Amino acid sequence: MIKNYFPIDQSKSLKKKILIQPLFVDQKVKNSKEIKGLGDNKSWSSSSIIKAIEKDLKKGINNFLLFIVPNKKQKHPEDFSFHYEVIRKIKNYFGKDIVLLIDTCLCSITVDGHCGVTHKKSIDLNKTHYSLGLAANTYLEAGADIIAPSDMMKNTTKYLRKIFVQNGFSNSQIMSYSTKFKILPEIFPSICSRLSTMCEPHFL
């Protein structure tokens, strides 16, 4: 049975239980680091993220969208061990007290900073889907509640659903979203420019 994490509220009022707090975990950060242009949000270390979540829980927020940035960059991403470590740590600590959504894209792990695996300046869709499938499956194994692909590649959601069925995650949920904005510029190498495809935070 598929769990409904965000039931429709007929009162049409904005309530804390439907809000989702974005959180950023960067392997390079020792404690926390301010993210320019994103209000009070910070990048957290894998050890300090627990306190950040506890602070939000006290305010009545229990839904979190996690963006994970590993040190190691890969041309063909296959190693998502840091992601697994972070997700596992959070879910082991908080359990069902939180709903954990994981941003599923390759931009923070690819060498060139693109959302897909590139070959001769073009996206290799098959290899991109393969890496995204490995990532999403790893996140679910670690305890993620919802997979949130933001890669904007063709048929990603369809591909992930097929992978989930094959690996025993048939009831796992997917929240696909396509609006991406220009934050964390330090993550992306200088050779990567996506100014024409990304919008400023204040437009969202």
Image (cartoon, rainbow, N blue to C red):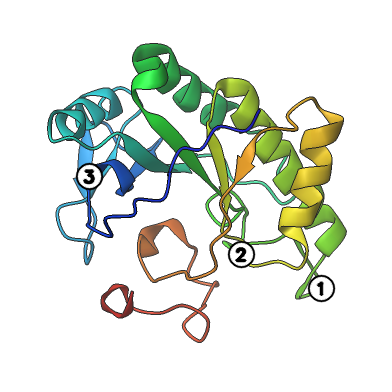
Crowd band around label 3 with a 10 angstrom C-alpha radius: few (<14), some (14–19), many (20+): few
Q: Earlier in the sequence, mark 1 or mark 2?
A: 2
Amino acid type of disc 1?
Lys
Where residue 86 sits, quadrant-wise, is top left
Amino acid type of disc 2?
His
Which dot marks residue 114?
A: 2
Where residue 32 sits, quadrant-wise, is top left
Left or right, 140 with respect to 156, comes to: left
Quick check: 53 above or below 101? above
Where residue 72 sits, quadrant-wise, is top right
Q: Secondary structure at mark 3?
A: helix
Q: Residue furthest front?
A: 10
- Distance from Cα at disc 1 to Cα at disc 3: 46 Å
Q: Earlier in the sequence, mark 1 or mark 3?
A: 3
In the rendered image, the quadrant that contains the N terminus is top right
Where is residue 171 drawn, in percent x and y?
69, 32
Q: Earlier in the sequence, mark 3 or mark 2?
A: 3
Where is residue 52 drawn, in percent x and y?
21, 32
- Distance from Cα at disc 1 to Cα at disc 2: 13 Å
In this figure, which residue is indicated by the disc labeled 1?
120
The residue positioned 82% from the left and 64% from the top of the image is: 124
The residue positioned 36% from the left and 60% from the top of the image is: 184
Q: Residue furthest top?
A: 92
Which dot marks residue 130?
A: none
The residue positioned 51% from the left and 87% from the top of the image is: 196
Q: Secondary structure at mark 1?
A: loop
Left or right, 110 with respect to 99, comes to: right
Residue nearer the viewer, 2 or 52: 2
In this figure, which residue is indicated by the disc labeled 3?
16
